[in-house]
């Protein structure tokens, strides 16, 4: 097992539920105290004494909950882990939940990266999606956060109902003016069961056409490059040195623990997720059981497939020598089939990565990798 790991901690509370959200979250504040009490108990159930490399507080909206809960959580982490000095601690936020008191406390606790869920600067789209802020609040609280944070990410979604090229261009102009250190720009995915999907199915809302998505994402790529951001993952750009170190743990298929409702983890060849059900979460912890929903001991083939799925999201791809040493004959068998069956992959020097076409059609590339896997199912090398 890697002696350096990441921690993901899920904080499932929000002021309101966004139309497009499929993450486990609640607006029921009455259970905040209980949830954090059980979250700290859950952390106690896992015996790990190594070095914590990164921490990511996700949600939900971690900056919505009372500061006392975040403070208790960090006291627990400091007491539990003898080497608790992560190089990166991220907290996710919605702009309207930020204020001077909270930002000062986060800074005092050692949180050194703030991820702001912007989604868009267009007030009409924000209102339609049930976001509780406008572009004036975004800008005001961004500058407030800059007093405490030298590493700030903006999260955007391309292709929400009402999105168009004029709005996208305005988003990019504001990125250029405000200068966050990191930008995530995701294409909206309507595969999940959300209130927005139901409205789309009833014809009450409409998504932009595919041509806008394609041209719009090309514009994002070109403009962020012009501004000095390096694209290092399919949907992520960073100024030099500001790549998200926690997410790189995921994409490099390294070790991390997940705590809280729905949190996932990967330790050695174990892959798990926690339950999405509050009642089950509380009941299992009451019985001193880790609240797993899914727990799997990966085969070598599972691990190789996951490593490809995650690593090929990175623009620089995966080191081939590392794969060969790790997986031996299984690697050779897999890659013999891979380049025959999957277009959009290229090998450059000692790395395998996606071509531009592959990045544009990454969903199809990943589907094809699963087909390769099925062709050699059961082969362990």
Image (spheres, grey):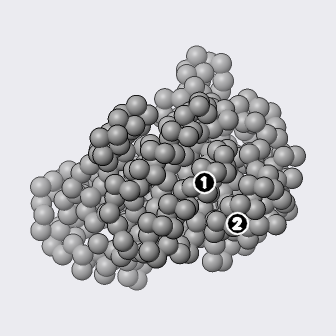
Q: Is residue 69 left or right of residue 35?
A: right
Q: Quadrant of the N terminus?
A: bottom left
Q: How many marks?
A: 2
Q: Residue at x 69, y 53 (%)?
A: 116
Q: Does residue 245 appear anywhere in the picture? A: yes
- Residue picked out by circle 1: 70
N-term-proximal mark, 1 vs 2:
1
Callout 1–callout 2 Cβ contact below 8 Å: no
Among the 4 quarters of the image, the one containing residue 231: bottom right
Q: Nearer the viewer, residue 39 or 17?
A: 39
Q: Is residue 219 left or right of residue 233?
A: right
Q: Is residue 36 left or right of residue 329?
A: right
Q: Residue at x 80, y 33 (%)?
A: 124
Q: CA distance from mark 1 to mark 2?
A: 12 Å
Q: Residue at x 40, y 63 (%)?
A: 256
- Residue picked out by circle 2: 107
Q: Position of residue 305 (x, y in %)?
A: 29, 59
Q: Is residue 308 left or right of residue 314?
A: left
Q: Position of residue 126 (x, y in %)?
A: 75, 36
Q: Quadrant of the C terminus?
A: bottom left
Q: Position of residue 12 (x, y in %)?
A: 54, 41
Q: Which SS class for mark 2?
A: helix
Q: Nearer the viewer, residue 129 or 328?
A: 129
Residue 165 lies, with reference to residue 18, above or below; the image says below
* Crowd band around label 1 with a 10 angstrom C-alpha radius: few (<14), some (14–19), many (20+): many
Q: Does residue 156 appear anywhere in the picture? A: no
Residue 218 lies, with reference to residue 36, above or below; the image says below
Residue 231, labelled with which disc? Answer: none
Residue 128 lies, with reference to residue 13, above or below; the image says above
Q: Residue at x 12, y 60 (%)?
A: 379
Q: Position of residue 300 (x, y in %)?
A: 20, 63
């Amino acid at each position: 097992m890697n002696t350096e790991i990441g921690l993901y901690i899920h904080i499932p509370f929000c002021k309101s539920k966004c139309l497009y959200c499929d993450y486990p979250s609640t607006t029921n504040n009455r259970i905040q105290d209980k949830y954090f009490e059980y979250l700290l108990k859950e952390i106690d159930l896992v015996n790990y004494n190594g070095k914590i490399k990164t921490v990511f507080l996700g949600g939900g909206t971690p900056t919505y909950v009372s500061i006392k809960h975040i403070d208790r959580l960090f006291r627990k982490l400091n007491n539990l882990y003898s080497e608790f000095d992560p190089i990166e601690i991220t907290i996710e936020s919605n702009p309207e939940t930020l204020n001077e008191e909270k930002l000062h406390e986060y800074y005092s606790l050692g949180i050194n990266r703030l991820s702001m869920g912007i989604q868009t600067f267009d007030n009409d789209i924000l209102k339609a999606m049930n976001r509780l802020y406008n572009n004036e609040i975004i800008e005001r609280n961004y500058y407030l956060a800059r007093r405490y944070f030298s590493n700030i990410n903006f999260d955007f979604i391309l292709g929400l109902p009402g999105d168009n090229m004029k709005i996208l261009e305005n988003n990019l102009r504001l990125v250029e003016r405000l200068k966050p250190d990191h930008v995530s720009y995701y294409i909206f995915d309507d595969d999940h069961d959300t209130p927005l999907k139901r409205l789309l199915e009833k014809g009450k809302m409409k998504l932009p056409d595919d041509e806008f998505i394609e041209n719009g994402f090309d514009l994002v790529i070109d403009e962020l490059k012009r501004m000095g951001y390096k694209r290092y993952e399919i949907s992520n750009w960073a100024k030099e040195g500001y790549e998200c170190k926690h997410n790189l743990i995921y994409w490099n298929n390294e070790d991390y623990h997940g705590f809280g409702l729905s949190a996932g983890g990967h330790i050695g060849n174990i892959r798990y997720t926690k339950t999405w059900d509050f009642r089950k979460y509380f009941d299992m912890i009451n019985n001193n059981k880790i609240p797993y929903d899914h727990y799997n001991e990966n085969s070598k083939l599972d691990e190789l497939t996951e490593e490809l799925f995650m690593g090929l999201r990175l623009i620089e791809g995966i080191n081939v020598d590392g794969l060969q040493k790790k997986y031996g004959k299984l690697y050779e068998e897999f890659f013999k089939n891979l380049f025959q069956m999957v277009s959009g992959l290229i090998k450059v020097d000692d790395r395998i990565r996606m071509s531009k076409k592959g990045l544009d059609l990454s969903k199809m590339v990943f589907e094809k990798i699963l087909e390769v896997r099925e062709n050699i199912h059961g082969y362990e090398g």
